[in-house]
Amino acid sequence: MKEQQKNTVSSVEKALRILDCFSIEHPELTLSDISRQLQLPKSTTLNQIRTLERAGYLYKSQNSQTYLLGYKIMELNYCFHSTIPIVRYAIPIMEELLAASNENIYLTSYINSRLLYLECLYPTRRFTTYSIAGKTLPMHCTSAGKAMLSQMSEEEAERMIAKNDFCAFTPNTIIDKDQFRLELKQCRERGYAVDNEEETLGVRCVAVSIRTVKGVVAGALSISGSILSMTDDAIQRYTRLLISASNSLTPYAHLFPPIQLQES
């Protein structure tokens, strides 16, 4: 750890920490907000912000004194997304799942013990107003997160459970760790996981993990829809489709980005 710290550039680290201050919950921040959050002097923070602003990573709102993430972040996200090898192989399989279910289809992985959405396909009756690719969530509240955790070794799963923030998104969210471990046991036994309105009320999801030829959990495929369309019978039917789809991706699962190894 000391060797890693010695090889880092403090100014770059501070700039990256500024970018990390922004989130879906806090898309606009003032100089004071950022300075207070990072516990840095305003003068130091302002110099960093101005540098990021000139480079296009931040921009200042014309109507207030707040800053927002800049267009360069969007460019980098596009660059990253377009170069994920597994997506090219997953898209045709996801399109088949979409045609068979007419529900939302998600390809996910994980990073720093959080679920990461890599790709998504929506039916024509699309109710989602933006692409969810790049979004992260805690593992415990999604079918994909539970599907991946349930197929990991007990040691690896426990390590990720310890880092997971068991916050409640809905009254159905499992926030007790012992109850969650029991849920994972049931997922492991049946080979799939279900989200019963645990992340969003009115939405049910079913997911199956994707593993490499060596058995390493690399990601998951999931089908998501309303509680009206995602009946128990539909979930059983979609589970069979997901198992076949995930098996089709096994030969290419090593092409997932190595994000799932970043546990720092």
Image (spheres, rainbow, N blue to C red):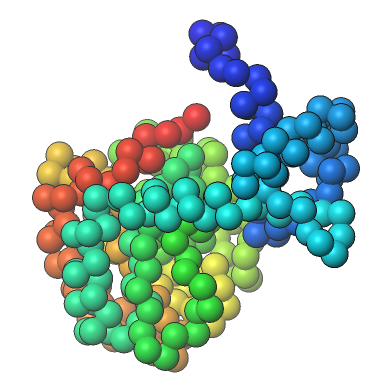
Q: Report whether residue 33 is seen.
A: yes
Indicate whether 2 appears above or below 261: above
Q: Where is residue 193 in the image (x, y as percent from the top left)?
A: 35, 64
The residue shown at (48%, 66%) is 132
Nearer to us in this view, 232 or 229: 229
Q: Where is residue 35 in the image (x, y as percent from the top left)?
A: 83, 36
Total marks placed? 0
Q: Position of residue 67 (x, y in %)?
A: 76, 52
The residue shown at (22%, 59%) is 88
Q: In which quarter of the image is residue 156?
A: top left
Indicate whether 162 appears above or below 108: above
Nearer to us in this view, 212 or 182: 212
Indicate whether 106 appears above or below 56: below
Indicate whether 88 appears above or below 222: above
Asked whether, in this view, residue 72 is left or right of residue 83, the answer is right
Q: Where is residue 95 in the image (x, y as percent from the top left)?
A: 23, 75
The residue shown at (24%, 53%) is 86
Asked whether, in this view, residue 54 is left or right of residue 154, the answer is right
